[in-house]
């Protein structure tokens, strides 16, 4: 980080031992322009991040620096002595430069007094013979360095910026124009990397506004500036080259476009067509000026870039899903997951792919946090409409994520939720139709019971042993399923047990009774054991039933069976990708709810069902799975070729 040497080489030069004379590490880069440099480091570990570098730390390293220059004054047991052949020839080089660095995992930067004292003492120890520089690094510096390696941070690009007004020093912004050809080349080179913080991916160039952008650039490039609003981009820093003229080359580091994804991708598409036409068309595109605004984030408070992204996208319809991607806490989670867990935390709608063990969708994180933190009534609302726990008019999301939300807690909740859902899906987990109905319709409630039984002690502390409780999750899942099923059975009995094979709607109604569930779950948790309600009606055993198949565009199929008066579709069934206008409002809502809760996930040009799902009827099931209205009794086919309505 300081010297630019490989991590493995740096690790070998750690000298933090007894008798180290305050020199905890060193580096002597071998390949660099200019005079040789010796880096001397003193490190202070702080597990809680509250260490403050003080003048005593300064004196210790400066004394070590002074002793190193004589060598004979070093402590006899100083580990740096083993590296004499590497370091001493450089130390005695006349033009050598020393960099003294004080580093800590603490959050607080040293005071101006400490920094000034370090500079004075270092200069005094160096005298007039060598050059010396002082550096201070704290936790934030290490975090930024790690993030640059593992998280989206924009791209580095260079192009000619056309001024329409000077740099605004107060707002740290550039406003003017840039050649459409330059912008198109940036996108062709970096693709989606140029759109790291944009809430949407680039869409097709064949219709609507995008097609108009392409047409204007090819047919009327000189007037492009008048017809299109342009783009807004964030960057960490910029650097101008050459004279301060109206048109000046500038290099942007960490550039990402946050408003104008469609414009930029369409410009790239137009550039490809211009290149096919020939040099004249390309030259014409180079004359097209795109209105642009660059905003520098260096020195800004955390979350400032996310606020810019949000406010600049409000001109377009902003969905609750888009708001998840723009929330600064979720952007922090994305960075923290990469550094602390080695996981990719996917926040944009086009990134939802949660099944790999080293990936996690923000949707999965929201569901996991909701299962743990929300009340039973709120979870009933979420089961009916998953967007209830997304950002928006309702305040449930605010109970899940905030400035103090710990990455450790989210990471652990997600892992536990995956175990919970996997246990509920296992063959043999449900031995009766009633248990299957409760497992499918009440999965969030079961997760809530499990999280309550696991407890919260230490879950937000990455150093705690909370992870050891994950081994207990399967047992808690089966106990919670048994308890909740017994409670539902008791409730049905008291209201008049449904006839065999006719219980689905009654069970669904019980699991939507939020007031009863709130009291019953507290009773289950208080009892610390099975519900064992008196007078429980006998469960309906899982009967032998034919498995019906539903063709999906003649390529794939969905698989399902009757279940207590409803229709159960099996996990890994395929579904159509698109929502067609013929879907009724309830059918469309059911589809979107499955997608929002990761029940249906993209799989190529189709959707795949990740867990068993229950429906009221074969027609509702067929419509939701195909994506348009359908006659379920005719289209669900049994193994012997008979349709659903022909099988008794």
Image: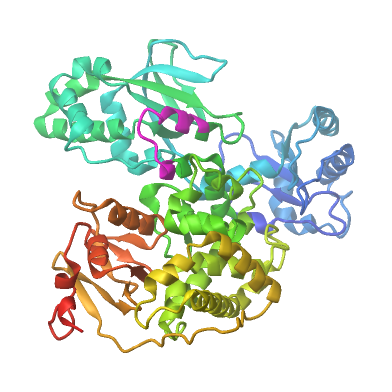
Q: Residue furthest left?
A: 277
Q: Is residue 341 left or right of residue 643?
A: right
Q: Nearer the viewer, residue 452 or 163?
A: 452
Q: Residue at x 60, y 60 (%)?
A: 372
Q: Quadrant of residue 547?
A: bottom left
Residue 611, x across and y down, in percent:
39, 70
Residue 321 sits inside the magenta stretch:
yes
The image quarter containing residue 602 is: bottom left
Residue 517, image x and y in percent? Answer: 56, 65
Is residue 228 one of those drawn in magenta? no
- Residue positioned 41% across, 30% down in the render: 314
Q: Is residue 88 above or below residue 268?
A: below
As drawn, is 645 to the left or to the right of 320?
left
* Nearer-the-camera pick, 232 or 178: 232
Give residue 117's position: percent from left, percent from top: 85, 30
Q: Is residue 6 visible?
A: no
Extent of the magenta region: 307-322
Rendered image quadrant of residue 20: bottom right
91 in relation to 316, above or below? below
Above or below — where is 345 with respect to 457? above
Q: How many marks?
A: 0
Judging depth in this view, the residue of 307 and 624 nearest the camera is 624
* Residue 463 vs residue 100, the one in the foreground: 463
- State the quadrant of the N terminus: top right
Residue under the point 40% across and 81% down: 433
């Amino acid at each position: 980080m300081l010297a630019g040497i490989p991590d493995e080489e740096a690790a070998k030069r750690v000298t933090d031992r007894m008798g180290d004379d305050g020199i905890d590490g060193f580096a002597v880069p071998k390949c660099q322009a200019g005079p040789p440099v010796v880096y001397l480091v003193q490190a202070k570990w702080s597990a809680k991040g509250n260490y403050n570098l003080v003048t005593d730390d300064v004196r210790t390293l400066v004394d070590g620096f002074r002793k190193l220059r004589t060598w004979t004054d070093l402590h006899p047991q100083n580990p740096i002595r083993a590296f004499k052949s590497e370091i001493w020839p450089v130390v005695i080089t006349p033009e050598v430069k020393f960099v003294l660095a004080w580093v800590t995992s603490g959050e607080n930067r040293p005071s101006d007094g400490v920094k000034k004292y370090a500079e004075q003492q270092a200069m005094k120890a160096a005298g007039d013979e060598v050059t010396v520089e002082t550096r201070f690094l704290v936790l934030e510096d290490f975090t930024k360095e790690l993030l640059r390696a593992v998280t989206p941070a924009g791209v580095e690009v260079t192009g000619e910026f056309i001024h329409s007004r000077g740099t605004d020093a107060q707002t740290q912004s550039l406003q003017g124009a840039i050649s459409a050809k330059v912008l198109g080349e940036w996108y062709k080179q970096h693709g989606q990397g140029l759109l790291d913080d944009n809430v949407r991916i680039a869409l097709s160039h064949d219709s609507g506004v995008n097609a108009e952008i392409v047409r204007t650039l090819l047919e009327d490039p000189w007037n492009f500036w008048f017809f299109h609003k342009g783009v807004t981009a964030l960057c960490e820093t910029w650097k101008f080259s050459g004279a301060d003229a109206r048109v000046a080359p500038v290099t942007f580091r960490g550039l990402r476009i946050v408003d104008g994804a469609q414009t930029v991708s369409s410009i790239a598409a137009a550039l490809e067509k211009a290149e096919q036409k020939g040099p004249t068309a390309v030259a014409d595109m180079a004359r097209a000026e795109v209105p642009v605004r660059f905003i520098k984030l260096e020195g800004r408070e955390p979350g400032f870039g996310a606020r810019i992204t949000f406010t600049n996208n409000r001109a377009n319809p902003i969905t609750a899903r888009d708001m998840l991607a723009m929330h600064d806490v979720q952007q922090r989670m994305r960075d923290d997951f990469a550094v602390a867990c080695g996981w990719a935390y996917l926040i944009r709608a086009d990134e939802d792919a949660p099944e790999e063990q080293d990936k996690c969708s923000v949707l999965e994180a929201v569901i996991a946090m909701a299962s743990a933190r929300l009340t039973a009534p709120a979870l009933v609302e979420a089961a009916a409409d998953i967007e209830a726990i997304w950002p928006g008019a309702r305040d449930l999301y605010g109970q899940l994520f905030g400035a103090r939300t710990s990455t450790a807690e989210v990471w652990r909740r997600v892992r536990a939720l995956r175990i919970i859902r996997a246990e509920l899906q296992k063959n043999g987990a449900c031995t009766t139709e009633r248990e299957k109905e409760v497992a499918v319709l009440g999965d969030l409630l079961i997760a809530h019971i499990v999280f309550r039984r696991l407890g919260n002690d230490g879950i937000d502390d990455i150093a705690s042993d909370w992870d050891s409780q994950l081994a207990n999750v399967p047992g808690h899942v089966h106990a919670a399923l048994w308890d909740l099923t017994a409670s539902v059975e008791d409730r049905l009995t008291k209201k008049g047990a449904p006839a065999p094979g006719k219980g689905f709607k009654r069970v669904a109604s019980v699991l939507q009774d939020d007031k009863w569930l709130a009291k019953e779950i507290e009773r289950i948790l208080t009892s610390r054991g099975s519900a064992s309600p008196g007078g429980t009606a006998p469960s309906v055993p899982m009967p032998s039933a034919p498995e019906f198949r539903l063709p999906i565009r003649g390529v794939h199929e969905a698989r399902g069976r009757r279940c207590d008066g409803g229709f159960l579709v099996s996990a890994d069934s395929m579904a159509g990708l698109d929502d067609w206008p013929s879907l009724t409002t309830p059918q469309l809502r059911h589809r979107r709810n499955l997608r929002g809760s990761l029940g249906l996930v993209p799989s190529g040009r189709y959707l795949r069902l990740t867990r068993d799902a229950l429906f009221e009827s074969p027609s509702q099931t067929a419509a939701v799975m195909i994506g348009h209205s359908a006659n379920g009794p005719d289209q669900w086919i049994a193994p012997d070729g008979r349709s659903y309505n022909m099988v008794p």
